[in-house]
Amino acid sequence: LAGLFLALTGINNWQMLLMALPLFISYSAYLLWRKRAAWQPRLFMLSIAGITALFFMLPLAWPIVQEQIIGGRPETIALQEPDNGRTDLLSYFIPPNLYDTTMGKNVANPYLTRPYEQIAASTYYIPFIGYLALFLSLVGIIWQWPQSRFWLLVAFLYVILALGPWLAVNGQPTTILLPYYWIENSFIGVILRRPHRFNVVLSLPVSMMAAWGMTAMVNTSLVRRRQPASVILLTTVVILLVLGEVRRAVPLTTTPYSVPDWYKRLGDDPENYGVLDLPVNDRRFDKWYMAYQMTHGKPIATGHVSRVPTQAFNFLDQIPFLASFLAHKDELDSSIPEVSQNLNMLAEGNIRYIVIHKQFVHEGYRQQWRDWFTIEPVYEDDEVIVYNTSPQFGVDFTFSQRLTDALGLIRISYAPVEAVQNGVVKIDARWGATAVPITESQVCFDWLDDTAVSRYTLCQPISIAWPTANWQTDEVVKESYILPIPEAIPPGAYTLAMQVADENDQQLGNQVELGPVQLSAYAPQSSSTAVWGEAIHLPGYTVTQSDNMLNIDLYWRTNKLLDRSYIAFIHLIDTGTGQIAAQNDAIPRNWTYPTFAWEPGEIIKDTRQLPLTEIPPGLYQIWVGLYDQETGERVLATDENGETADTIYLTDIQK
């Protein structure tokens, strides 16, 4: 039986077997020492236990040894991790809730909500032993010393190992070396990874000491005289006290479990195909997908394995749009144009559906994913969004506008509708194909005046990254275009139109109108040389005033691509009090055009309004500045005099 249970420990978790071996070896040595007169029979029995354990474990252990150790790929079971997950000495004696709220006051980072985070990998596994368990263990050590001494030594051994390579007390690492230091980088150390896991085995010697303490209490004369009623009463009281202490010190939570209706429907489908659940590659999600699999019974593209084989994601790594998910990111690379090609690669691997789980991803990211997929989901409810990996025209997508017999627009959008000379118009187009295009094609954009005459035409390939020569039937492609607005186009009202052309700019199919664009001249009332961070310029601005409204047009320009979003603010300062009388803080173009989307050299007209109805008469100054949307930190600017400040003065107004 000892051999069987040792084997089950290893089969359940090979790490657990390694952690249990010190106990098994220590107890074997203790038995041989305690029964020295009968050491040969004892040794024989222990040998039988070891052989029995090997008999059951070897068939399952040998493939691991052969594949990962003999095969020269130990990285799949031995992982180097910077966080070694040691145990804080005080955490054995202080419950987690009390430790978090009252201890760790002198930690290096006062903003940590859980001081234990500084020195432990798993902050929710603080190994509080329990005051009643400690009391019973102390009784056992004092009154049952011969029976408890071995378990005290084992408990000490596992505490020393769980403390890690350096002693830490109250969230503060010390310079005191501990024995684990010498095995931390050994093969055993990198397999175990985190020494705090030894606390799992610590529960056994503590339980034994507490059991001997309970035995001592039961054997007192007061209890013995009234057996069995007194024994039952004492045991009941101790159990209730233990449960009460655990419940108070370590609140136990349960996870409500429900299966989305989609998976119940999937389980009724007899066909064999796979499912890809998103997001992926995180045990917070993947274990749920494994649980859902018990209902639908289909193969899943990902799941949780603690020691991931090196080739585990070779298939998914070949699919570009999954790269961010496999890197534990929620932001999809929306610049990838080949929507259907990415989906078809999954279909070729017999993965029929992509299931997006709403509970695991923020709504903003979900909208970004939905936008990239372009096609309509085959199913959606409050829990999941499901897409087909083999989209078909007429089923998963249709055309809002057809341009040729083979090509059409699923949808298209553009901005801004009020543009300025030397600015740009950006177009987002979702293309579809009902057949293989006959020739390599271009897209041409026309600025049509009020007489439907084109005043300016710009042609470019439909897709540089994925040329139409590669397109197949039921192709879905996402592309964006930048249309610079030269000064040669006079201000006025225009209609933006587009058409498909061949390589010689000859029209193919129909011209379609996208919508109106009001073009204004680049004519700021005042000029400026202000520069924020050597990248964002304000070459000019215009201020107009009515009785109840102040209108300010800011003309921004950047000389390089920006990687952050900045808020532009305008302050109307009362010159008498120095206080802000009115202000306007927003992403340019009324929150629609963040700075990281600006093109180098582009002029961005940013119109702001400040109501004047509540402002008393007087002299006011207009100041402008930028701050980081994420951090709130203002960006320093250099004015026309070469002075640096976080706000730039523009002009005065009189109310």
Image (cartoon, helix red, strand yellow):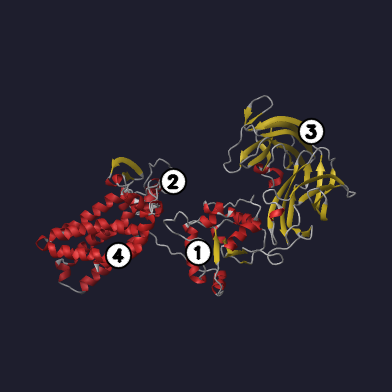
- N-terminal of the pair, mark 4 or mark 2, is 4
From the image, state whether disc 1 or disc 3 is nearer to you. 1
* Badge 3: residue crowd in 10 Å (few <14, some 14–19, many ≥20): few
- N-terminal of the pair, mark 2 or mark 3, is 2
- N-terminal of the pair, mark 4 or mark 1, is 4
| Amino acid found under the numbered disc labelled 3 | Gln
For disc 4, the marked residue is 7
Q: Are marks 1 and 3 in contact (CB under 8 Å)?
A: no
* Badge 4: residue crowd in 10 Å (few <14, some 14–19, many ≥20): many
Of residues 455 and 331, the one nearer the viewer is: 455
* Badge 2: residue crowd in 10 Å (few <14, some 14–19, many ≥20): few
- N-terminal of the pair, mark 3 or mark 4, is 4
For disc 1, the marked residue is 289
For disc 2, the marked residue is 112
Give me the C-alpha separation between circle 3 and circle 4.
84 Å
From the image, state whether disc 4 or disc 1 is nearer to you. 4
Could you tell me if residue 130 is visible in this image? no
Q: Position of residue 84 (x, y in %)?
A: 37, 48
Q: Position of residue 23 (x, y in %)?
A: 24, 58
| Amino acid found under the numbered disc labelled 4 | Ala
Give me the C-alpha separation between circle 1 and circle 2.
32 Å
* Badge 1: residue crowd in 10 Å (few <14, some 14–19, many ≥20): many
Secondary structure at badge 1 equals helix
